[in-house]
Amino acid sequence: MDANKNKDRLWKSASGLPLQKFYSESDVPQEQRKRMAADPGVAPFHRGAHPGGYRTKAWRIFQLSGFGKPEDENERIRFLLEQGETGFIMEHDRNTGDHCYNVDHPDVVARREDVGLTGAVMQSVRDIDICMKDLPLETSFGHAGGAVVQHAPFALAGYWTVAKHRGIDLARLPGTGQSDFFLTYLGCVTKQQVPTAAGLRFNADIMEFCDKHLPRWVPVSIAGYNGADTGLNAYQELGALFANAVEYLEEIKRRKTMPLENAARACSGVNFRASMDLFEEASKMRAARLMWVQLLERRYGITNPKVANLRIHCVTAGSRMTYQQPLNNIVRGTVMALAAALGGVQSLGVSGYDEALSIPSEHAHQMSVRIQQILQEETNIQAVTDPLGGSWYVESLTAELVERAWGFFEEIQDQGGFLATLDSGWLHERAAENQSEDFRQQESGEQVIIGVTDHKDDISPFEVDGFMGVDDAYDVALERLQEVRRTRYEAGAGKALSELEAVCRNGNNIMPAMMDALQSEVTLGEIGDVYRSVFGDWATPIQT
Amino acid sequence: MKTAGKRILMAKTGLDGHWRGPTVVAKALRDAGFEVIMIGMARPEEVMQASIDEDVDLVGLNIGGHVDVAVRAIGMVREARPEVPIFVGGVVPPHAKRKLESLGVEVYPPGSQLPDIVAAAVRLTGAA
Amino acid sequence: MLLRCGLRGQPEILGAGMNPELEQQLQGELERARKGDRGALARLISVLERGGYGAACVERGLSARAADSYTVGITGAPGAGKSTLVNALLGEMVADAQRVALLAVDPSSPLSRGALLGDRVRMHSHAASPAVFIRSMASRGQLGGLAVATRSARRLLEACGWPLIMIETVGVGQVELDVASTTDTVVVVLNPGWGDEVQANKAGLMEVADIFVINKADKAGLEATRRDLEGALASLPQQRRPAIVETVATEGRGAVDLWAAICAHRQAIEESGELRERRLGQLRAELRGFVEAHLEVALDELFATDCADLQLAAIGRGAVDMPAAGDVLLAELWSLVNSPKRR
């Protein structure tokens, strides 16, 4: 590498903020200096959600896991819990789950080998029951799956139905299911999906239902992660995430079916990405908490600290995991996890080092847990809350991110709001611009990725060859689907399904009917067929 | 380069909706003068039909998941349009890459740089 | 006669003259395409798109329009939902046991000449249907909403027995007049809240539209847009007043009504004899377009010679004025068009 390279370089943060050689007190904006006086756990919360930080509660080790048959996934989850994971995520197969298809749908049959590669196939409450076998539902924090909006009502109702069967009082059940617009309509656009307006309705229905029956459940978890990993930069991720929250809050406000404060609380568990720009990413977590306080107070007059205290789940950037020299990704995962930990998070997932090759192998999963345990146990990072607080650099970065994020938030409002930017493709264009810029910088040498743009010739004694799960997922899923059809009480299932269709059409809350449908062993694909006939298909914005 | 009027079909063989990679590649090909026909997620027979009806000079498949799904799509395109070259990108672990390359398909895994992909398209369509 | 007027396309092809072998090969392709070989049909469209001698050979093999083919144009601003509407409409047409061919036009980049053609993404329900032929076309510099070869591709499809042809134009934000001179029924797609657009384009809209679609009819502003539209159409006599159809294409809602409106319009203009007049008009526009395209090639060729440079220099010196220089060049153009190598 050129020895003088650094001298002439124009230094910027990953989101393009110009950076000075060093920072002094005078670089911190006046307002931010005033905020620095606040302690962690006190509004405006940028210094942390709890005064005791990780002393009060270590961050939750929360890894995405899932493949194969429900029993394979159950086994992996139990393995991770044994390794020290403190929450668990049930990932449903994307081919079937995201699309609400059964395995005998022609689009799935055409890709039958893919079935079970990205999550376990769960087409009825029986499958969900197998996947949840012996899991500590009440003492751990469960993610029921259903990250994609049209899938969430099914996944949640399935999880809750199984919990009920086990005698658990839903009022005491903790967990989440995400139901994320960023994933559904921006990051990972499915072949078929309910339009955004129907998606908004689903999420508001889930919020209402949880408000009544599952107060400990996080009904929706907005995942800026999925925007960021699609190309949005740090301040765009922040601005878009709160623009999304506003859509949910406005919908509840319009419905007047639950106190707005409860709705705000329902939205206050969010998901961010941690990427490689260590200080910018740490500052982003601080900025997020500050912005939530500002949004609730300015727009809705909500100041209740229990509601305005944003809780953050963070996942390290999967897109920064390289295909080349995958073991280097263990280092990347560590740095990104450190950024999140320094910024203050409640929960963390570290992408597998084999992310660019496949779903995580057992070893990659174990490493993701170990990275977090090493940080927690060996670095003393948990001792002091907001260790970066008072750094002139970090405080000014935090302030600048907040300012730019509100700017982006306003741009989204000018476009007609978050949903409108998804429908029109405006947000996709913003993400695509950044991607193209990244590629340009990699070509020009401004952006270096070890093993990809530079130092490409390493030889590793360890070949990482991509974990391929199990090979009987499709066949077993098909058998079980036929078994459900053969052995369920058909009249009950039929009645529950028509009731669900009626509710989809008449606009009432869909969740009670969805609970009945799961209880009556209605299958995923039948529910998807109802959606498709009632709501049609979202017109994916086409990139040009 | 004589890319003008050369047509490239871009399809995703899986049902996984990550569009970031294929879109960036499609734009780079457009900017190099190609006409890029995007069909999104498509089953093997849909890829094949589009490769016929659109009379393309090259087929680009974004794959993920199991290599056999891609192999089926490649087989159907080969049957219908044996003269048309195929290149592949996406999440392709080494064992899948080896298999695809043994079928005479060029593979561009994550981390491939756009100029290399564009250069391949130029070469494969005979636009050099 | 058409061949005599020269050959369109790249200059190097212009001088190529007769190539009986190629001509024979293309006639063979045409024969296969007529018999239902979709590969041959697709390749022939490419030949038409490339222009030049090959295109002329194909065009010569196409007779005048087959009376039993019918062409529907779909136009409207970008974002109006044309592709999604077309997808829903294809479903209706196919359900009505009709085979349909679609030519979907998207713009070429003026800088790179490349294009992203994404209409098929919205049409996956028909992606492998034997009853539906979809061809994406890049405009290749053609203005007016169609691609260079859209008209000849339509004639080819007719010759190959496709009873129903849809042409989806480029959405460029204004009404595309070319579609009216190429199709039998023109559907203009609007959205709620486009009252201003209706007012601003009143004359153009009324001129081309046979049917108006207000797509995204579940969005706010539907009533106002409908009112604006009805107001604009009020001056037309009842029987010439375009139907207004409301659709929510993402849900497939209204597609049945739109298909019914298209069928009704077809029946009306068939019965009144207007269809015959329209087709004469289309033929006239096509012929004119053909001549224009060839003249343009010749003009480009002329300006690439030093003949134009000489006149420019003379104008610069003040030795000759613009009209006189123009006369000289027009005479040159005439002799270029008539030169023996072009015959």
Image (cartoon, grey):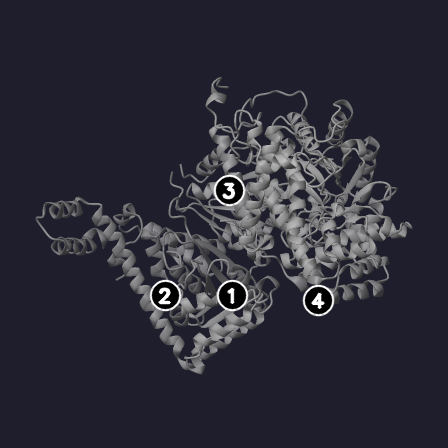
Helix, strand or loop status at disc 2: loop
How many callouts does the rendering have?
A: 4
Task: Tell me residue C38's x, y (percent).
Answer: 49, 56
Q: Is residue A496 left or right of residue A193?
A: right
According to the image, label 1 marks what residue? C193
According to the image, label 2 marks what residue? C63
Residues at marks 4 and 2 on the same chain: no
Helix, strand or loop status at disc 1: loop
**A62 or C101: nearer the eye?**
A62
Q: Are marks 2 and 1 in contact (CB under 8 Å)?
A: no
Q: Amino acid at mark 1?
A: Gly
Q: Earlier in the sequence, mark 4 or mark 3?
A: 3
> Which residue is at 72% across, 62% downward?
A256
- Label 3 and label 1: CA atoms lie apart by 29 Å
- Label 4 and label 1: CA atoms lie apart by 25 Å
Specify few, some or many for label 1: CA neighbours under 10 Å numbering under 14, 14-19, or 20 or more. some
According to the image, label 4 marks what residue? A505
What label sits on residue A433 in the rendered view? 3
Q: Amino acid at mark 3?
A: Glu
Q: Nearer the viewer, mark 3 or mark 1?
A: 1
Q: Splitting the image into 4 quarters, where does residue C90 fall?
A: bottom right
Helix, strand or loop status at disc 4: helix
Q: Splitting the image into 4 quarters, where does residue C328 fall?
A: bottom left
Q: Amino acid at mark 2?
A: Ser
